[in-house]
Amino acid sequence: MKTLQPAFFLFVFVPLVKSAPPIQQEPFKFYDYDTDVTMGSLIHQDYEVQSKDIKKDATNVSLDTALRLQGDDSERSVKPTKDTNLPTCLLCVCLSGSVYCEEIDIEAVPPLPKETAYLYARFNKIKRIAVSDFADITTLRRIDFSGNRIEEIEDGAFAKLLLLEELSLAENRLVKLPVLPPKLTTFNANQNRIKSRGIKANAFKKLTNLAYLYLGHNALESVPLNLPESLRILHLQYNNITTITDDTFCKSNNTRYIRTRMDEIRMEGNPILLAKHVNAFSCLRTLPVGTYY
C-alpha cells in the first residue's frame, strides 16, 4: 500500500502540471506597445504645435525687436534742434542776476530780465546790436559778446548802461567802435576789422576809469588819440601802425609828465621801428613791447 501512494500521486498531479498552459505576455506587450505609439504620436504632434508656436512667437519677437531697433536708429539719426524762440531763461541759464547764453546759435540779443547784471552771450551768431536790446536794462555791469558775427552796433546801444564796467566785443567783424559807456574799466575789441577811421578822436577821453584796453589783431594805422590817464594795460599788437608822435603817450610840451599808471604796452607785429620814436616813450616807466631794430 505504501508503494502505491507515490505512484498514485504522480499519476494524478503530473498530467495536471503538464496540461497548464504557459502564461501569455503578448497581449500585454501589444497593449504597452500600442499605448507607447499612441502617446508618442500625441507627444510628437504636441511638440510640432509648440514648435510652430515658438517659431511664430520668435518671428513676432524678432520683427518687434527689429522694428524697435529700427525706431531707435531713426531716433538717433534725428539731430537735436535748438529752439531759439523759447523764453530767455529756458533758452539760456539765468542765475542770481547772471544770464548765460553761450553757444546756443542765437542771432540776436534775447530779452533780458530787468535785474540782469552779467550777460554772457559768447560764441553765437549775433550780427547786430540795437538800442532796444538794452533800453530797459540799467543794471548791467558786464557784457561779453566774444566770438559772434557782430558787424554793426547802433549809436547809443550802450548809452544808458551807466553801471557797465566790462565790455567784450572780441572776435567779431566790427570796422568801427560804438560810443562807450562812461564807467568802463575794461574794453576788449581784439580780433576785429577796426581801422583808425573807425575810432573817434575822443572815443576814450572821457573814460576816466578805463584801465584795460585791448585792440590787438585789427587794422589800425595809428595809436588811438586821447588815451585816458587811468590806463594800465594797452594792447595794440598785430595791427598796421606805422607812425607814433611825441603826443601819442606823452605830452610834448611837458617834459616832466609821467604816466604813472601805465604798466604794459604791446606793439609787436606792427610795421614800425620803435627805436626811431624814442621821445614818444619818454614819459613811460617801461618801454613798449615791439620791434626796435
Image: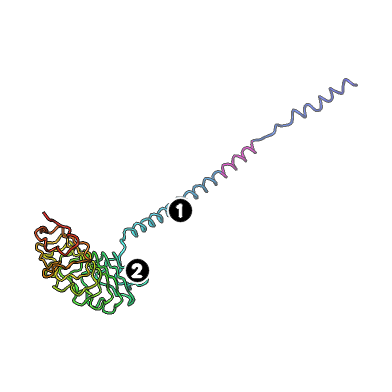
x then y, percent, for residue 109: 26, 72
Q: Residue at x 34, y 58 (%)?
A: 76
Q: Could you tell me if residue 20 is visible in this image?
A: yes
Q: Quadrant of residue 60?
A: bottom left
| Marks 1, 2: nearer the viewer | 2
Sequence-earlier tag: 1 or 2: 1
Q: Residue at x 15, y 63 (%)?
A: 218
Relative to 162, is 264 above or below? Answer: above
x then y, percent, for residue 7: 84, 22
Main secondary-structure element of the magenta-colored stretch: helix
Query: What's the magenta region?
Result: 26-39
Q: Residue at x 31, y 58 (%)?
A: 77
Q: Which residue is mark 1?
A: 57
From the viewer's perspective, is 129 left or right of 67?
left
* Residue in the foreground of this view, choosing between 141 and 281: 281
Q: Quadrant of residue 240?
A: bottom left
From the viewer's perspective, is 148 left or right of 99?
left
Cα distance, mark 1 to mark 2?
50 Å
* Residue in the foreground of this view, choosing between 13 and 223: 223
Q: Which residue is mark 2?
A: 93
Callout 1 amino acid: Asp
Callout 2 amino acid: Val
